[in-house]
Amino acid sequence: MTERADAVAAIAEVFRELGFEGASLSAITARTGLGKGSLYHLFPGGKEDMAEAVLAGIDGWFARAVFAPLRDDPDGEAAIRRMLRETDAYFRSGRRICLIAAFALDGTRDRFAGRIANYFTAWRDALAGALRRIGRAEADERAEHAVLAIQGALLLSRALDDPAVFGRTLERLEADLLRR
Amino acid sequence: MTERADAVAAIAEVFRELGFEGASLSAITARTGLGKGSLYHLFPGGKEDMAEAVLAGIDGWFARAVFAPLRDDPDGEAAIRRMLRETDAYFRSGRRICLIAAFALDGTRDRFAGRIANYFTAWRDALAGALRRIGRAEADERAEHAVLAIQGALLLSRALDDPAVFGRTLERLEADLLRR
DNA sequence: ACTCCTTTGTACCGATCGGTACAACGAGGC
DNA sequence: GCCTCGTTGTACCGATCGGTACAAAGGAGT
């Protein structure tokens, strides 16, 4: 049943590049190598079903790489550093886009509003919790700013076609978050 | 010739809400009240022509409200504060989205890559220039961070449906930018 | 009133959209 | 060999896409 996982990964890339509306069935069949028959067999609900699967996959990454460490690691500083490292890896050091952000900005937003809001609040709150645990002041404000800066950096990296923006921002955030 | 300006403003809102791909001709005719005949008379090049006009309008706002003050105002601090205030007004305190950002994230990017990159670099560089003029260290880094935080804040405000995020970020930025 | 030219509505174009129907296919059990 | 059933390619659906053609309408100048 790994074929489905492969398909989801490929579809995610298509969504990332073209957006939800722009990702036509023909683009998806081309990228996955799967015909419509297989596609609708794997995802009976069509495009929306595919998007759900993709978002579920992202939730999985987030829970594993961000949420769990931030909540469970007894060493809060290490957890924050690890979160930043995982984020850098996931977004390919700024060469990859945040699909949730892309969905949030186009007409797709209404369709997945709950999931989108949940993703960002979970991130912010988990980070704020870790900051509070290691005794940093203004945990909420700093966490919110970090999440928003990560998203802004991804956007700017993409807009300028300059991934270095993302790297610089992550370094700055590590210093800002950990400073007493 | 103000009709064209009205049409451009209406079309901009459609693009903001639906994205470039999502903004169908029928959505545009509905919002503008103009039939296809008028639309293609005003914008012979079709949707792409409309997008160009919209982007030109944004460039106009940017040049007037951001670039010119940042470059010309002898009081650099006042210029930065004014830029922040104009930005807050333009984006309706976080209730409005940045169209350039939306274009940067979806499949439209390639079509307008130059314009998109130009918009953000101009903003960053103008801000860095003002910072340097008032003798702040790390002008480039702080300017880049401010631009990216504005975009991230707009995104997060939209994603969480909570405009307050934008207001908080602008306040934080004013303090960060002006601090010696 | 007549003309000329801009502006507009509407019918239509081929292409493509997301989605469905279904027949051909293939591997495993018997 | 045959049957079964999950899987797949393909033809097709109505709707809508962006765009074009063109004739009717409108308005200014004379």
Image (cartoon, coloured by chain):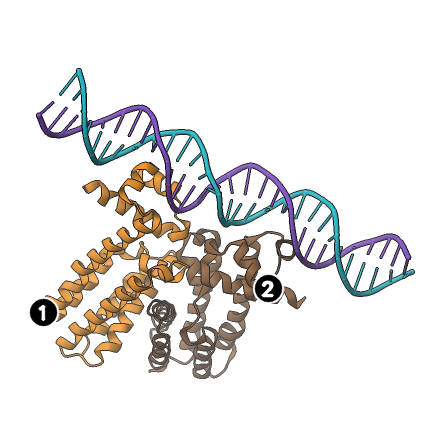
Chain colours: A brown, B orange, C cyan, D purple
Left or right: C27 in relation to B105 = right
Left or right: B115 in relation to D1 = left
Q: Are marks 1 and 2 in contact (CB under 8 Å)?
A: no
Left or right: A167 in relation to A39 = left
| Image location of residue B130, percent across then percent down | 16, 72
Q: Which residue is mark 2?
A: A7
Q: Quadrant of the C terminus of chain A?
A: bottom left
Residue B24: which numbered mark, if any?
A: none
For label 1, the crowd category at 10 Å Cα-Cα, with few meaning under 14, some 14 to 19 and many 20 or more, is: few
Is A169 placed above or below A28 here?
below
Residue B34 in view (yes/no): no
Left or right: A135 in relation to B5 = right
Return the chain for callout 2.
A
**Amino acid type at mark 2:** Ala
Q: Residue at x 50, y 82 (%)?
A: A74
Q: Residue at x 29, y 37 (%)?
A: B38
Is D2 placed above or below B2 here?
below
Q: State the CA–CA distance, disc 1 to disc 2.
A: 57 Å
Camera-nearest residue between A58 and A155: A155
Camera-nearest residue between B94 and A103: A103
Is B144 placed above or below C1 here?
below
Q: Which residue is mark 1?
A: B75
